[in-house]
Amino acid sequence: MGIDISQLSEAAQRQILEKLNMQKAAKKLAQQIKEEAKQTKYHSVATESHGIKFDSKKEARRYEELILLLRAGEISDLRLQHNITLIEGYTDADGIRVKPMVYKADFTYFDKSGKWIVEDTKSEITRKNRVYLNKKKLLKDKRGITIVEV
């Protein structure tokens, strides 16, 4: 059911067309904002490798390298997105539950000598992230684990 605006005055027709154009522009802007919101904080590009989705191309490439090392027997027990608890959860004096603090490593594995390696794929900018730096310090202090940054 459409309206024939040709019978309206020229000023009314112009007003209707301007209103329609503003609505189209608003929809286009909303779509653009929605697409920009999908971008990651550090502009990394999600990538799939071996049927696994990775947060960045760099992380996917490192996984492919680790798979080759695993097949060659250079490393063992390769794990992805391994959680390491930094601080256990607890209930405070007021009965409020405090969640545990967890560090999620990109990769963990054992090298040929049996040493456990915790590895994280980082760009120059993400290495300076305050939350990451604090968790890195806690991991070293509480667990004696040094993160290998790739």
Image (cartoon, rainbow, N blue to C red):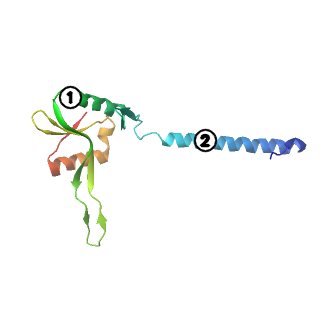
Depth check: give the residue in front, 78 or 88. 78
- Residue 68 in percent (x, y) is at 23, 27
Residue at image point 85% right, 43% down: 5
User: Is the residue 72 above or below the residue 117 in the image?
Assistant: above
Whether residue 18 is situated above or below residue 48 in the rendered picture:
below
Residue neighbourhood size for the residue with mark 1, other residues' Cα within 10 Å, grouped as few (<14), some (14–19), many (≥20): few
Which residue sits at x=16%, y=44%? 145
- Left or right? Give the position of 36 relative to 138: right
Give the residue type at disc 2: Leu
Mark 1 residue type: Arg
Disc 2 crowd rating (10 Å Cα; few below 14, some 14-19, many 20+) is few
- Residue pointed to by mark 2: 29
Estimate the spatial distance between the alpha carbons at disc 2 and disc 1, rounded to whole Å. Answer: 49 Å
Q: Quadrant of residue 148?
A: top left
First in sequence, mark 2 or 1: give its number.
Answer: 2
Q: Position of residue 82 (x, y in %)?
A: 25, 45
Q: Position of residue 126 (x, y in %)?
A: 33, 39
Q: Nearer the viewer, mark 2 or mark 1?
A: 1
- Callouts 2 and 1 close, C-beta under 8 Å: no
Residue identified by numbered label 1: 71
Mark 2 residue element: helix
